[in-house]
Amino acid sequence: MSADWAAARSAFRLKALPRSLVSGGVILGLSLVLALWPSLLAPYDPTAFDYSALLAPPSWAHPFGTDNFGRDVLSRVIHAYTIDMQIAIFATIGPFIFGTIVGAFVGYAGGLWEAIFGRIVDATITFPFLVLVIAIVSVLGPGLGNMYVAVGVVGWVFYARLVAAEIKVQKRLDYADAGRVMGYTPLRIIFRHLLPNAITPAIVYWVTDMALAILLGSSLGYLGLGAQPPAAEWGVQIADGKNFMNTAWWISVFPGVAIVLTGLGFSLAGDGVAELLRVRR
Amino acid sequence: MPLFSFVIRRLLQMIPTVIFILIVTFILVRLLPGDPASAMLGDRARDADVERINRQLGLDQPVVVQFFYFVRRVVTGDLGNSIGLKVSVSSLILQRLPVTLMLTGMSALIALVLAVPLAFIAASKRERLPDSIIRGAFQMGLSMPVFYVGIVLLTVFAAQLKLFPVGGYGDTLGDRLYHLFLPALTLALSFAAVLMRNLRASIIEVMNAEYVDFATAKGLRSRVILFRHILRNALISTVTLFGLQIGTLLGGAVITETVFAVPGAGRLLIDSIYGRDYPVLQGLTIALAVLVSLTFLITDIVQAWLDPRIAR
């Protein structure tokens, strides 16, 4: 009892928060501000051409330089936060919710459902994730909307697997029996009682999955299958600048730094959340 | 003998997986807006051509019949013909897949060479400065998109320092290894990060195992304990990880090959998308998925062989 109390108290003191959660949280907080209000900080219009400053190197007027259309790279990197943070959330929230619900049912029902689900998992992980997503996007047509569909079709399986495994453990515990004896419906037992105790791994995975979503989104943008030019998106920007790497490295390098930084924010936060929830339990 | 029956059981498990792979790839092409023939031929297609392709693909038959035709063709190794390149898809795949296998093999090797010593240092200096630095490096490695790493390495080591070719693929084996080194390194960096995290954890776990205490108590030299006891057991989980990561590695190969213009299966996949060459896209998706499930099979068997408890 006293150990629980100490753990709960320390979890709510800022000093005791995992360091990775704090640093990840700061990075993500700033990213979110940039994503929501890009115009506040971006000095120029991200799509405005300036033919008097083509391929200009970094300077006071253009801290990250300009690209081959004279567009300000800093403004484009900042405006890209809107799209890339949106990718991080939209590409993962659907799989998270749907996968959690399916996983909860499968884990609780067991038997035949579990066997069928097991086969689906086995078969899904035999497709290289990126290859399957690329194939689906190319069939549906390039663009962010179709990318979300493609990621969703594949991604829910991983959440469902995590939740199903946890529910399977939880449903054998005494409190689940107690719920059944009380005459609660399976729905109520699953969602009110078991799921709150079973969802931790899925939440931890969700945070790190957002980092993967940004890598995937920018990769598809780079390949021309994700966000479409002239939209400012980091992968698209890197693709725009790749032919100028020898003469104007700044076009591609700065968006890349933004990807690494944001990805780092999510993976640090993921580690931190894992640590925090482990302490609490 | 348990190993033998384990292998048989695992082989039987592959059957539903392969059927599922075929169903998914069959549906995939069916998701094309309009009929596949018009999609393949583009806007300027003549009706006669559309009809011919539709008949060629068996699209005038009911869906279930079509599926069985499809399965019969695939099982006999007939994946259709490429629309753009006018050759059979299976010959294209056989020509391009070895390049990708060599690329992924090389990068797995590089990743292992990078990850094993670093994981050891991190595990033995746990929670101290070297561990923090190494863990920071693997967090970075995980956050770097493959295409970005590729472009940066290409610019620095090939275009500026001229240490490596800018892209392509050689003719002799030595030349090929030389051409593939940078792409393999690109692919290896993120894989090394995953590998290192896993190895570090399993080395720490093994170090705390009783048999290591026992070996120390017996007075074995620390180098013997390190290689014979710790490393060997820690590598078992690496075999599993390799199996689980092969899909990610192949996905990374698609991007690396595009960045470095390596004529492998990944590059072929992207080309088939740009060229709307759907038979190639479908054939490659099947081939890559089958490749992954074969890798699962092999890693499972290797694991059962390393640790006989698994086969039971």
Image: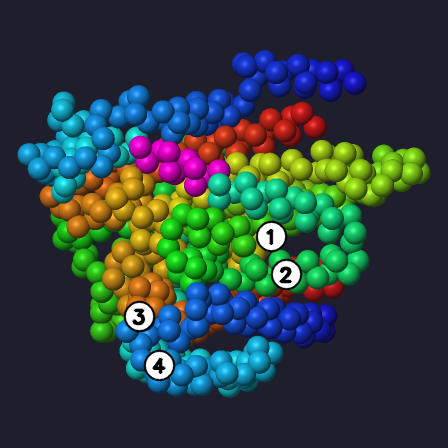
- Residue ID for mark 3: B43
Residue A15 pos. (x, y %): 54, 14
- Does residue A102 lie above or below A5 as drawn? below
- Residue ID for mark 1: A157
Q: Which mark is residue A120?
A: 2
Please give the range of residues in magenta: A79-89
Question: Could you tell me the amino acid type at mark 2?
Answer: Ile
Q: Which mark is residue B47?
A: 4
Question: In which quadrant will I find the C terminus of chain A?
Answer: top right
* Whole-number angstrom distance, CA of label 1 to CA of label 3: 37 Å
Residue shown at the point (52%, 36%) measured from the top left:
A207
Query: Does the magenta run of residues contain B255?
Result: no
Q: Which mark is residue B178?
A: none
Question: Is A22 displayed left or right of B4 in the figure?
Answer: left
Question: Could you tell me the amino acid type at mark 3?
Answer: Asp
* Whole-number angstrom distance, CA of label 1 to CA of label 2: 8 Å
Question: Is A242 displayed left or right of A23 in the figure?
Answer: left
Residue shown at the point (58%, 36%) measured from the top left:
A204
What crowding class fits label 1: few (fewer than 14 Cα within 10 Å), some (14-19), or many (20 or more)?
A: many
Q: Is residue A26 visible?
A: yes
Residue shown at the point (74%, 64%) measured from the top left:
B312
Residue shown at the point (72%, 45%) measured from the top left:
A104
Secondary structure at badge 4 equals helix
Dividing the picture into quadrants, the one containing residue A253 is top left
